[in-house]
Amino acid sequence: MKKRRIAILTGGGDCPGLNAVIRAVAKKAMGEGGEVIGIEDGFEGLVKNRVKKLQNSDVSGILTMGGTILGTSNIANPYHYAIEGKGCKLTFRDYHKKAINNFKKMKADALVAIGGDGTLSMAYRLFEDGIPIVGVPKTIDNDIVGTDITFGFDTAVSIATEGIDRVHTTAQSHHRVMIVEVMGRTAGWIALHSGVAGGGDIILIPEIPYDINIVVKKIKERHSKGKKFSIVVVAEGARPEGGDVVVQRIVKASTEAVRLGGIGFVLGDQIEKLTCIETRAVVLGHLQRGGSPTPFDRVLATQLGSKAMDFIDEGAFGYMVGIKQNDFTRVSLRDVANGKRLVPHDNYLVQAARSLGTCFGD
């Protein structure tokens, strides 16, 4: 086995399981006599040449830790790098050649890029420009093309489900409508899975635009049958038929400039006015992406990190480690860069939930 020098970075939002991947890559590489170079704060570290050689002590005991020991950034794009000037005014520069030169200075054999669709899209461009890259899919949103599952998703669903469980008691006690807003951007996977797991009466996801009148009708029907509370689980990217998403803020420096959020409060006001039932909204927000990863995510992240090293040994650069039908597969970074994995209308879980009386607002 050739002794390799491996560079590794984590990009995009933080996510439970990142450290488990770092640990797997580092331990496997070091076990083969190789070296591992950690790049700090994602592609920002690659542009600014902020790197450090990882030792066994750096990756020992991090399996259960949330976040990432390397740091991350969801605004650093080597091809469109934001520079803040006077008055917080932003200018943008193309620093991809600088990033490539810094990688060459490391004398690394490969770069493992761990991230979501934004990070892996940039990884694809850097691969096209000469860096040997292997991608590892990370996102709580579970929306990466080419893989059935991403690490971080199971943890986010577990946290969201616990949140839904906890609002059940106050909803029942006060005869309220309780709305739980979860993350997911333009994909409804978290809302769908946590909504079903938490017994949500109404689940609203981006892929199925909702009619507020149908939502209200469902709540009134439950009340007429003596069920004086309702649980609504709504994805941050959900929108009404013919309407738009609710935007929380615009981050111009970010690769994902539009930040969604607030649909729960908008929906709550509408429901209370149309039903005369007290309605409260809870936004789980970043609670879903923090803390220790679930055992499932620890195992998945470990497997993905180990498999990424296999890809490097095989010279399979320009690919992401994907999982299809419980088996590993090579997914071209080009495919990852060109789309998102959304919830299909005929998804079995959607159909199962409908058969049990769950309303999707359509």
Image (spheres, helix red, strand yellow):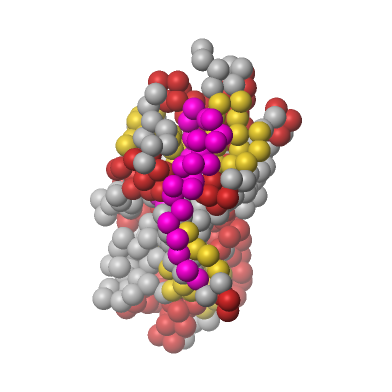
Range covered by the magenta-colored residues:
90-118
Residue 188 on the magenta segment: no
Where's residue 173, x and y in %? 61, 71
| Quadrant location of the C terminus in the rendered image | bottom left
Tell me which residue sits at (60%, 58%) in the image: 287
| Most foreground residue, 303 or 42 | 42
In the rendered image, the residue lying farthest to the top is 1
Q: Position of residue 321 (x, y in %)?
A: 41, 33
Query: Is residue 152 placed above or below 80 in the rendered structure?
Result: above
Q: Is residue 350 above or below residue 329?
A: below
Of residue 30 and residue 270, the one placed in the foreground of this image is 30
Residue drawn at point x = 62 percent, y = 41 percent: 51
Does residue 274 appear to the left or right of 161 in the view shown? left
Residue 273 image offset from top left, x and y in percent: 44, 87
Q: Residue furthest right?
A: 57
Position of residue 112 measured from the top left corner of the image (x, y, whole percent):
49, 35
Q: Which residue is located at x 70 percent, y 27 percent?
A: 56
